[in-house]
Image (spheres, rainbow, N blue to C red):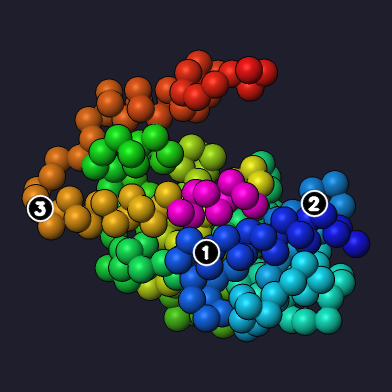
Amino acid sequence: MLEELRKRVFEANCELQRRGLVVYTWGNASAIEREKGLIVIKPSGVPYEELSPEKMVIVDLEGKLVEGNLRPSVDTMIHVYLYRHFEKIGGVVHTHSLWACAWAQAMKPIPCLGGTHADYFYGEIPCTRALRPEEVEELEKNTGRVIVETFEGKDYLATPGVIVAFHGPFTWGDSVEKAVFNSVVLEEVAKMAAATLTVNPHAPGLPAHLLEKRYKRKHGKNAYYGQPKDA
């Protein structure tokens, strides 16, 4: 079932390791088949060197196992919650990348300090609030909930990523490949922001008019970056 999607999710997980965003068994990538309401996700606790397309696990939108001999990722219910509430996304990625986790552990959003950030994220990358004691019993579900809560009134497609307080980054996109891309970029801009604030702790941030221009030249109907799709 979903053989092609299994292959893509397998490759997406491997790409996280190739990019240095995960070590050992950390992190996970998933994709959804919207018409069938099925999610393909990395199995829990399996080293990347031992993964294969056949080992990817299929769950439904309740997080229930549909196909596979292994347990799905421990973060499955976070992915499920995001797919159920961010209805335009097709892939989700979670890593424990160094610089993004540093911001998460500091409970600070990643500020938009320059054009590279603005090319891909429309403003700061938010940090969620910490989970309350009564929310820890359903840790994964409530982690998904606080991510969605953080984006109330915000465009989750314009800022396709978040850092979860004391945990780490999650990104998404219209495909699992795009979610991986956004995860790589998020780590780079997290690193750039930390370096910038080391050089100048009072760096003012990118002015709004430059943020608007930088973001919209790559996104939206009037974007002009790159080549026409039919070129």
| Left or right of 173, for residue 51 | right
**In this rendering, is residue 165 above or below 223?**
below
How many neighbours does mark 3 have within 10 angstroms: few (below 14), some (14-19), or many (20 or more)? few
Q: Tell me the CA gap for discs 1 and 2.
A: 25 Å
| Left or right of 94, for residue 133 | left
Q: Tell me the CA gap for discs 1 and 3.
A: 30 Å
* Quadrant where the N terminus is found in the figure: bottom right
The residue where tag 3 is placed is: 199
Q: Which mark is residue 33?
A: 2
**In this rendering, is residue 224 above or below 71?**
above
Secondary structure beneath dot 2 equals: strand
State the predominant SS element of the stretch in magenta: helix
Q: Nearer the viewer, mark 3 or mark 2?
A: 3
The residue where tag 1 is placed is: 18
**In this rendering, is residue 210 above or below 201?**
above
Name the amino acid type tagged 1: Arg
Res. 146 visible in picture: no
Secondary structure beneath dot 3 equals: helix
Name the amino acid type tagged 2: Glu
How many neighbours does mark 2 have within 10 angstroms: few (below 14), some (14-19), or many (20 or more)? some
User: Does the magenta run of residues contain 179?
Assistant: yes
Tell me which residue sits at (33%, 39%) in the image: 116
Q: Nearer the viewer, mark 1 or mark 2?
A: 1
